[in-house]
Amino acid sequence: MSARLKTELWVQAFLRRCAVAGQSGAVLHRGHADAGALLVVINHLDGTHSLLVPPPGPAYDDAGNRLFENSTQVRLTWPETNEKIMRARRFDSDLWVIEVEDKSGFAGLLPFDH
């Protein structure tokens, strides 16, 4: 099993990868640098958003890669997305929240990404 990256390093590397792919991304809330959980907002640039969250159970696969799942089956408005984020932040003060603009997918984070 490979060593797991600290959350801050993972976020920096992921946002750099997004930039290289032509996708804008930003940190909305900085959590614990070493081991904070991570939420990823996908801004689809059409007024809708998806919120990717760690799955129940293991947050990493056997190779040490972070796992995510879509929090809902439908796209959300920003107020709906923000409410879910605020609820999660009240529960976990170490939580990171990042946003990536991706019109057609999930920034490569889901196995069925297009």
Image: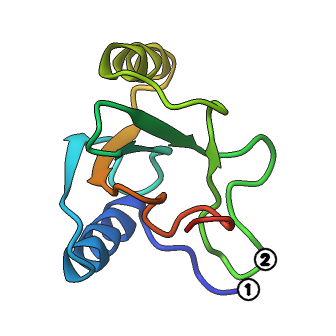
Q: Is residue 84 above or below residue 114?
A: above
What residue is shown with label 2? 62
**Discs 1/2, front:** 2
Residue identified by numbered label 1:
1
Please rate how many residues cluster around mark 2, counting C-alpha atoms within 10 Å: few if below 14, some from 14 to 19, many from 20. few
Q: Residue at x 40, y 35 (%)?
A: 49
Most foreground residue, 6 or 108: 108
Q: Disc 1 vs disc 2: Cβ atoms closer than 8 Å?
A: yes
Please tell me whether mark 2 sits on a helix, a strand or a loop. loop
Seen at 29% across and 30% down, the residue is 47
User: Residue 5: where, in percent of width, then height?
Assistant: 47, 73
**For the residue labelled by badge 1, is the local secondary structure a helix, a strand or a loop?**
loop
Amino acid carrying label 1: it is Met
Residue 81 percent coordinates (x, y): 40, 23
In the rendered view, tell whether residue 96 sits above or below residue 59: above
Q: Is residue 109 left or right of residue 63?
A: left
Q: Quadrant of the C terminus?
A: bottom right
Give the quarter of the image for residue 8: bottom left
Q: Quadrant of residue 1?
A: bottom right
x then y, percent, for residue 24: 18, 61
Q: Nearer the viewer, residue 88 or 2?
A: 88
Q: Quadrant of residue 56?
A: top right
In this rendering, the answer to whether 33 lies above or below 95 is below
The amino acid type found where label 2 is placed reads: Asp
Question: Which of the two residues, 36 or 76, is positioned nearer the viewer here?
Answer: 76
| Horizontal side of residue 79 vs 22, given as left or right | right
Task: Specify the farthest residue to the bottom.
Answer: 2
Mark 1: few/some/many CA within 10 Å (<14, 14-19, 20+): few
Q: Is residue 50 left or right of residue 100?
A: right
